[in-house]
Amino acid sequence: MHKRKDVLTTGQVAQICNVAPRTVTKWFDSGQLKGYRIPGSRDRRIPTSELVRFMKAHDMPIDALNMGSLRVLILDSDASRAEGLAKALRDKRDYEVIVAGNSFDGGLAAQREQPHVILINLMARDIDAGQICSYVRSNEDLSAMRIVALAGQINEAEARALQHKGFDAVVTQTTDLAGLIRTIEQVTSILY
């Protein structure tokens, strides 16, 4: 069993409350949601106990704190491979899985669905993984999303280079479902 985090980022609170991170920032700045700023930074942190108080005061369902289903967006131009992975993740972990076959649909799905994790097959046609990664990293509303590169047959230096570009993790054993699930759960340790 995972331990729930005691302190959350505005992006994590946004995902729990199903709002944009800037909405959480407004709640924080207006004093409705208590927390603290990281010294020397604009980053804010909200204690879990304060979030529970806030959610109860505003009649928000606190069962969202248990995170319910983890939302995963799979970007892969090979529809049968993507659907196979989606089915495996749904069956094994009851994840809510969305599939997109190109960069445009992936960007729309990221905005609309607000997934916790985006899995990008680096070998897929019509998907610019680097562009998607920089888009997510530069968009405040998407800042809490984690991005995992599915990249079979790359070496450790190439994997490190991908992480320097903004990927949260790189999975090289793309057929190892248990390893992929471990990676997803490590990068999304939002409240666990």
Image (cartoon, helix red, strand yellow):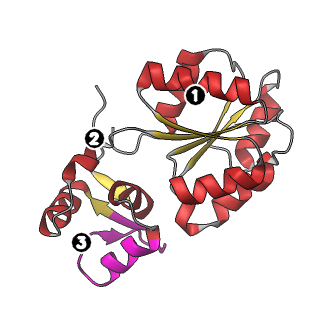
Q: Nearer the viewer, residue 178 or 170?
A: 178
Q: Which mark is residue 86?
A: 1
Residue shown at 30%/45% (left/top)? 5
Nearer mark to the viewer, of 2 and 1? 1
127 relative to 124, above or below: below
- Nearer mark to the viewer, of 3 and 1: 1
The residue carrying mark 2 is 4
Badge 3 marks a residue whose secondary structure is loop
Quadrant location of the N terminus in the rendered image: top left
What is the CA distance from the residue labelled 3 to the residue labelled 2? 19 Å
Amino acid beneath label 1? Ala
Mark pair 3, 1: CA separation: 38 Å
Q: Position of residue 46 (x, y in %)?
A: 30, 63
Q: Which residue is mark 3?
A: 34
Q: Amino acid at mark 2?
A: Arg
Q: Is 164 colored magenta in this rendering?
A: no
Q: Earlier in the sequence, mark 2 or mark 1?
A: 2
